[in-house]
Image (spheres, grey):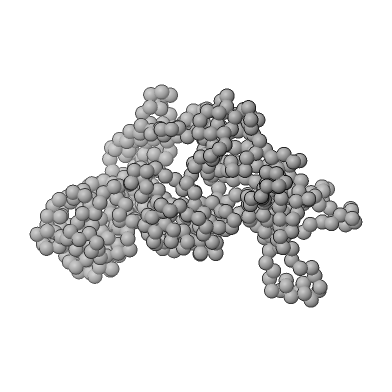
Amino acid sequence: MISIRYSDPPETDAEAKARKENGGAEPKDNVDISNYLIKTTWSGDNSQAARKLEFSIAYNTPDKDKSFQALDLKLGGYVYLFYRDTDTSDEAELFEGRIFYRKRSSNGYTMEFTAFDDLIYLAKSQIRAVIKGKVPEAISQVCSEIGISVGTLPDNLTAEVNFLADDKSGTEALRMILGFQETADKAAGSETSYLPVCISGKINVVKKGELIEGYTATADTNVIGTEHSESIEGMVNRIKAVDDTGEVCQMFEDIDDTQHFGTIQKIYKMQAPKAGETVDNAKAARGKLVKQKDESSLKGLGYVQCISGYAITVQEEQLQGKFYILTDSHTFANGQHDMSLTLQYMPETPETPNIKQTDYKAPVFNSSSGKMQGNRGISNGSLNVDAGISAGWEAWGNQTMENGPEGCAEFATKMGSYYSPFLAQEANGKVVGCDQLVADADAAGLLSYDTRDLQKGDVIVYGDNNHVVIYDGQGGYYGNSTSRNVTVHDSPYTDMSGLSVTKVIKTSRG
């Protein structure tokens, strides 16, 4: 059984003054409107930020029924949904949010409302800020920007965050922050995924796919019916990536699917890098591959813990095993609680697609050929670090190196030639290998094994001279991306495909 309580939104100064002058009624505060309810639907979607409450109430006007006391529920008003199993059990709050929409038809006797929880404010608000610190501090920074409190967070959110949220929505920023933790967990050998949720007006974080204990959906007890469909109509199992000349530069193929179902191919037009941005064409091309589509759904007796983001066990004629809840919709009407769920099967051992990547050539972009050649070249190391990095990135940023994916040392020397005489010497000497660069730095007295001693402009060396980048002084780096085949400005420098920092070339001082 459910109940809904309502409070008016905060008054403006002008509204409060007018009410007092006219002897108006006090604003509604925690008023139980349950007796007016006709139908209530509480729902959530894994792909949407906020949970939603839709409800309709009995409504009439004095002209039609003078004895009817109509409710005036305002836009921005607070609504609270409570649930209890029996008349004597304690009630639990399921939803806390504000009314964003209301509608009434003059030829009917109901009024309809839609409310969202406070995650809607993060979803609809954009921020621009440098997000730094450990994951909990970063989450608090984003939420405080919009004025929303933080609730309970998992204890293991310890990853370091450092990035620019440039006109991102609050929820996009949260997902980027949680992505740092997921990357750190993966590097430690654990596959995790996290989801922001709003509970009692506060932002909490939960692990996606946590199993709802003590509940099993079965045909004998609580399932009305299920549906399951499978389709390969939308399948794409081979992608050819072409550049501006129309030449095929890369190909990505799902080997198992092409063997089993035949080849279904699409063309991906590679995107040229833009100023201040990087384009991961390999990732974008892979993202165009589409596997078999399975859709499962369940209708059953309502269970309030069955909400999107969690997982349930199903033992039914068509569906057997553990399923992730993609969307949920709980309907309360005529004393009955029903629910509809869309589900995704969670195998005990997740399938890893067998994707074959074939590289043919470095891409050529017409748009990049128009960049002023006079600004792109090797300098003499005469600028200071700040000015040199700015000029070096202007010259060599978002470019494909002559050595393609293996051009990390080439890029470091060319960009660094604007502020470091040593890197200018290396660039003019056409040093393009990490081993040679490190050996020359050692001979020049610039090699350090103190990996904590980093200044802006230093060259960071990873592994056994496997990779090099230039430190940006803010936790990020300038480097050549092997997967994207383009030079990038990215962060954090500690996240380099599992490679550890082993040395530093002190080019900040020469």
Query: Quick one: 468 or 246, which is closer to the camera?
Result: 468
**Quadrant location of the C terminus in the rendered image:** bottom left
The picture places residue 303, in percent across and down from the top left corner, at: 62, 40
Q: Could you say which is closer to the camera, residue 424 or residue 247?
A: 424
The answer to whether one can see residue 399 in this image is no
Q: Position of residue 460 (x, y in %)?
A: 23, 57
In the image, 27: left or right of 434?
right
- Look at the picture and state if 352 lies above or below 199: above
Residue 490, visible in the rendered structure: yes
Q: What residue is shown at x 84% (from left), y 53% (from top)? A: 60
Residue at image position (43%, 24%) is 261
The image shows a total of numbered marks equal to 0
Q: In this view, does 156 lie to the left or right of 114?
A: left
Name the residue located 41 percent from the left edge and 52 percent from the top edge.
156
Residue for point 41% across, 63% down: 130
Splitting the image into 4 quarters, where does residue 201 fall?
Answer: bottom right
Residue 119 image offset from top left, x and y in percent: 56, 55
Locate the N terminus by quadrant: top right
Could you say which is closer to the camera, residue 63 or residue 17? Answer: 17
The x and y percentages for residue 118 are 59, 57
Q: In which quadrant of the rendered view does residue 290 lie? A: top left
Q: In this view, does 45 lie above or below 117?
A: above
Return the residue nearer the eye: 317 or 487: 317
In the displayed orientation, state which residue is furthest to the left: 443
Residue furthest front in the image: 88
